[in-house]
Amino acid sequence: MRGVRWRRIASQVGRSVTVWAVSTLTMLVLAGLLPDFRLQSADGDSATRIAVTAALGAGAFGVLSAVVWPLLVRLLLLVPAFVLGLLVFFLNGSLLLLALRINPSGQGEAAPETAVIVAAVMSAVASTTGAALAVRDDDAYRRRLLRLADRRRRAGPPCAATPGLVCVQLDGVGHDVLTHAVRKGLMPTVGRWLSTDDGVQPTHRLVPWRTDWSSQTGASQLGILHGSTFDVPAFRWYEKDRGEVMVCNRPTSAVELQRRATAHTGDGGLLTVDGASRGNLFGGGAGEQALVLSIATRRRGRDNRSRAGYFAYFSDPANAVRTALSFVAEVAREIGQSTRARIREQRPRVSRGGLYPFVRAFATVVERDVVVAAVMGDLLVGRTAVYADLVAYDEVAHHSGPCGRDAEQVLQRLDRSLALIEKAAEHAPRPYRIVVLSDHGQSPGETFRARYGLTLADLVRAGCGLPVPRRAERTRSGAEARTAVRAALRRPVEEKDERHRPTRDSEPIVLASGNLGLVSFPDVPHRMTKEEIEARHPALLTTLANHPGIGFLLVRSEGHDGVVLGPNGTEIPLAELDHEPGPLARFGPGAADAVRRTHSFPHTADIMVNSFHDPADGEVLAFEEQIGSHGGLGGAQSHPFLLSPLTLSAPVEEGAELTGAEHVHRVLRRWLREANGPQVPISTEAEEERAA
């Protein structure tokens, strides 16, 4: 044992000396290349003295980075995390200037802007060298991963020997997109798990599942984590009894939705016992929550660590510099890709200017790196259940399309993130079963506005006999990344929809959730019937139902509980949809059940509008400015995936279908029970009632 210990110490010392030597060489090279960076006096020095100056400067910079940087991050807890990421270069340059000032040789100086460049290059080189040296040493690699974990892990509960469960949500990745990426070789880690090559046994199984009508993260993740999608009719909807617009990615709405789901199911969530929630809209009852939207509005304290993951990650200067450099590269990549799309006059296409390149870089780099690091820390501390959301693909697919080259590059990087998590699991104190799943897919197609020159709101106003503005107002993207940026900046997460606090004389409220539209009349306290709408606006329903961009409408009816309306006077009661699907036929199996369930929600809009869908190419027409959309029925958006180890029981029996996020929740709970993991407290009667 003593010999092993000394070899370990010698190995660590050898790596440290090598990193120091490489940093010294890097400093010498930069001093020769940059005119404003000197390691010698004005009169000149010998090569030996310059080398000593570089060695002392590199050593001082390394010590300051290891000791002072975490203290700086702690002192800057009041600075928004996103701003802290932008300050990385300035802080690193300041440490280099300090290292040169305290250099015992008394030589060395740099202009402030040059110091920023030198510090960034040296940090990147040192990080790369250290990682390259440690990769062949499992113990060293594990220690490197341990440094990514938060200090709270040392106060965590004792680790059990039973397997833990880690669930990674690839936001917006449909089942077909995943299988295509695997066949194309874009995701080698997932491909290895599913391998059917001769002599190689697969370790995972892949099954699709079907969402509700509301095929979006708010409904799906609420159902997966809290077991209920009840009364979530869309991504955004108007509630007449409260006089407010609910938006799933608004913190105040997320808090309310989580409260309602908890009251509806009678339990705290999937992660109630020894769980961790990372990068999600909802907490799932986890004791450890970071980057979780539903706690973003609370004051910082013991129970609110929504942004703590950013500081835990950026406290390592190597992480900070690497992520900052990747952020800049991603902004440049997006600008280049959008410019190429404009030059080629690519269709369909939406605007990708303004702040979008920075939002994309935040989702595909900053949030991804921070969430993955947090998950790796959870594994290394041995938490029983972890659920994390990676939103990178969803954000890019909205603006570049779900099957384009831009989106494929994101899938490649997400696969590398899965490989990192898998590697961390190998060094965890307990075995882990890695489950990868998605909350919805994305359907391609141009926007409703691009095809017809008007928005859904314009069409509704025309049907009501109201004046239509010349220029349609663009609806906001519902991408989760935009809200994550606002939460990181500590800016209020409000949308234009909040302007609707209507009076009795106000006009109809029209909201969009992908290719699903909702029309509400705020001055009528109840959900209006078809007959009431026709008496008030005789041309409205006919105008909508017969428009070529509309697939079908759902409204209440006095003669029937509810009816589906289509073109040419088609009117089918909900009870007869199984025998006569009418306009729902092109939306595939399960559409009728999804429509009937949404009709039963208390806050379903007066008129539910689903866009046209072409089964031949899977296209829909988004009511938002997105060429990859989700939120309604039609195409790949309703078909996410569930990828699970073969060591877990099959999600469903052979020939059966996995339907709804609530069903996925029950499957995950069963897998936790199989591993003797946390038991969600719920009575047998309540569980049977929910299953029914």
Image (cartoon, helix red, strand yellow):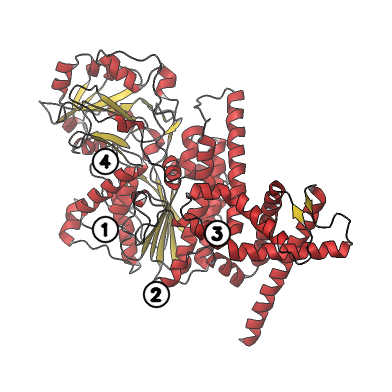
- Sequence-wise, the earlier of marks 1 and 3 is 3
Label 3 Cα neighbours within 10 Å, binned few <14 / some 14-19 / many ≥20 = few
Hey, which quadrant is residue 464 in on the image?
Answer: top left
Label 2 Cα neighbours within 10 Å, binned few <14 / some 14-19 / many ≥20 = few
- Sequence-wise, the earlier of marks 4 and 1 is 4
Q: CA distance from mark 4 to mark 1?
A: 18 Å
Hey, which residue is sitting farthest bottom in the picture?
2
Hey, which quadrant is residue 218 in on the image?
Answer: top left
SS at circle 3: helix
Instruction: Tell me the number on the disc at residue 72.
Output: 3
Residue 334 at x, y = what percent? 58, 36
Q: Are marks 2 and 4 in contact (CB under 8 Å)?
A: no
Q: Nearer the viewer, mark 1 or mark 3?
A: 3
User: In the shown orientation, is residue 409 left or right of residue 258?
Assistant: right
Give amino acid for label 4: Val
Q: Residue at x 78, y 61 (%)?
A: 54
